[in-house]
């Protein structure tokens, strides 16, 4: 029997252009992705995907299945939205995605505030890098996302507020306690987020603006890893002012005052322009639009 999960995996393979790309986007192992497609082919009795040197390509039968799968997903989405109109905020679901920093440090607080007003609405938060969040929005897996950079079409972004990036280091840094210029950072090692992260792109932009694009750089995955590595003296790193607040208050990390200061970055609400929102989603958007700065506390 054909399952929705199998259809979702097949469409992901097509959109990613291969099994390994689909596995990354779906946060699944490549063998698991292959098994889903293989089981779908077994259920339908025809091959759906051909592996080539350029990746994966659908067969004629696969093209038909992908087209029908997208129609099925569209009907299910329409069904959910239609039923939701009768529920208001007394039931339903809010599924919102955020890039790693936002999804980890900001969305839980915003969703908690929403849940107080709509306790009967089931809330889910999905966290991934910018590429993953945009793909979830494009595929209709989530309706709302909070991101840093401008998204690709047909996604549209609405800037909510801006936040500072700060350069942090271990408390024993020789540069702590005074103001330095980029030339003073020449001998420092910079700890960067993984590629595909909006923070990584901004980190690289700041280093270029400081004339430090050739500086010694290490790539580490996730903001928590960067904070721990900086605290252990492995290097300095540029992160959102808000995600290091507790470490700065505790004296585990210090901020290095650099002139010129890193530019601020925008936090934006991202969604598909052609997507109709459910009542819970509309209520959450209204809440987001009332936010003028990163909530304190």
Image: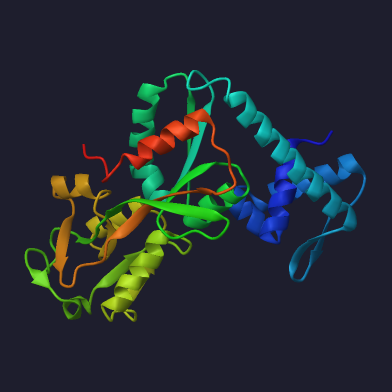
Along the viewing direction, whichever of 163 and 2 lies nearer the viewer: 163
Q: Is residue 65 above or below residue 149?
A: above
Q: Is residue 77 above or below residue 250?
A: above
Residue 68 x %, y %: 81, 44
Tell me, what colour scheme is on the image? rainbow
Residue located at (37% from left, 50% from top): 101
Q: Residue at x 87, y 39 (%)?
A: 43
Q: How many marks?
A: 0
Q: In this rendering, would 145 be left or right of 228?
A: right
Is residue 86 among what the camera can see?
Answer: yes
Instruction: Locate the C terminus by quadrant.
Output: top left
Farthest residue to the left: give it.
Answer: 178
Query: Is residue 31 something one can see in this rendering?
Result: no
User: Residue 148 in the image: x percent, y percent?
Assistant: 40, 56
Residue in the foreground of this view, choosing between 261 and 83:
83
| Residue found farthest to the right | 45
Residue 168, x across and y down, in percent: 21, 60
Q: Quadrant of the N terminus?
A: top right
Asked whether, in this view, residue 168 is left or right of residue 105, the answer is left
Residue 168 lies left or right of residue 51; in this view the side is: left
Specify the quadrant of the image occupied by residue 202: bottom left
Answer above or below: position of 177 versus 142: below
Q: Could you tell me residue 250's position as x and y percent?
A: 15, 45
Name the residue located 70 percent from the left edge and 62 percent from the top edge.
Answer: 17
Q: Residue at x 87, y 58 (%)?
A: 59
């Amino acid at each position: 029997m054909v399952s929705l999960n199998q259809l979702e995996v097949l469409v992901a393979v097509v959109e990613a252009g291969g099994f390994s790309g689909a596995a990354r986007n779906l946060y699944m192992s490549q063998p698991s992705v292959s098994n889903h497609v293989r089981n779908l082919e077994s259920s339908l009795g025809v091959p759906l995907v051909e592996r080539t040197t350029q990746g994966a390509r659908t067969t004629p039968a696969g093209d038909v299945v992908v087209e029908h799968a997208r129609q099925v997903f569209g009907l299910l989405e329409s069904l959910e939205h239609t039923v939701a109109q009768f529920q208001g905020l007394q039931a339903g679901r809010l599924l919102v995605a955020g890039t790693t920093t936002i999804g980890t440090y900001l969305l839980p607080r915003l969703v908690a505030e929403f849940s107080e007003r709509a306790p009967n609405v089931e809330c889910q938060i999905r966290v991934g890098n910018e590429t993953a969040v945009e793909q979830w929005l494009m595929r209709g897996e989530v309706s709302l996302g909070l991101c840093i950079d401008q998204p690709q079409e047909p996604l549209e972004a609405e800037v909510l507020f801006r936040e500072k990036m700060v350069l942090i280091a271990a408390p024993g840094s020789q540069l702590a306690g005074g103001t330095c210029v980029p030339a003073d950072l020449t001998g420092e090692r910079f700890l960067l987020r993984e590629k595909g992260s909006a923070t990584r792109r901004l980190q690289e932009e700041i280093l270029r603006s400081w004339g430090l694009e050739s500086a010694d750089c290490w790539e580490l995955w996730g903001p928590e890893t960067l904070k721990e590595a900086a605290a252990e003296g492995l290097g300095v790193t540029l992160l959102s002012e808000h995600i290091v607040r507790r470490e700065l208050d505790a004296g585990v990390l210090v901020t290095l005052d650099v002139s010129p200061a890193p530019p601020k970055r925008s936090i934006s609400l991202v969604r598909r322009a052609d997507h109709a929102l459910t009542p819970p989603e509309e209520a959450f958007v209204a809440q987001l639009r009332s936010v003028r700065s990163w909530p304190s506390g």
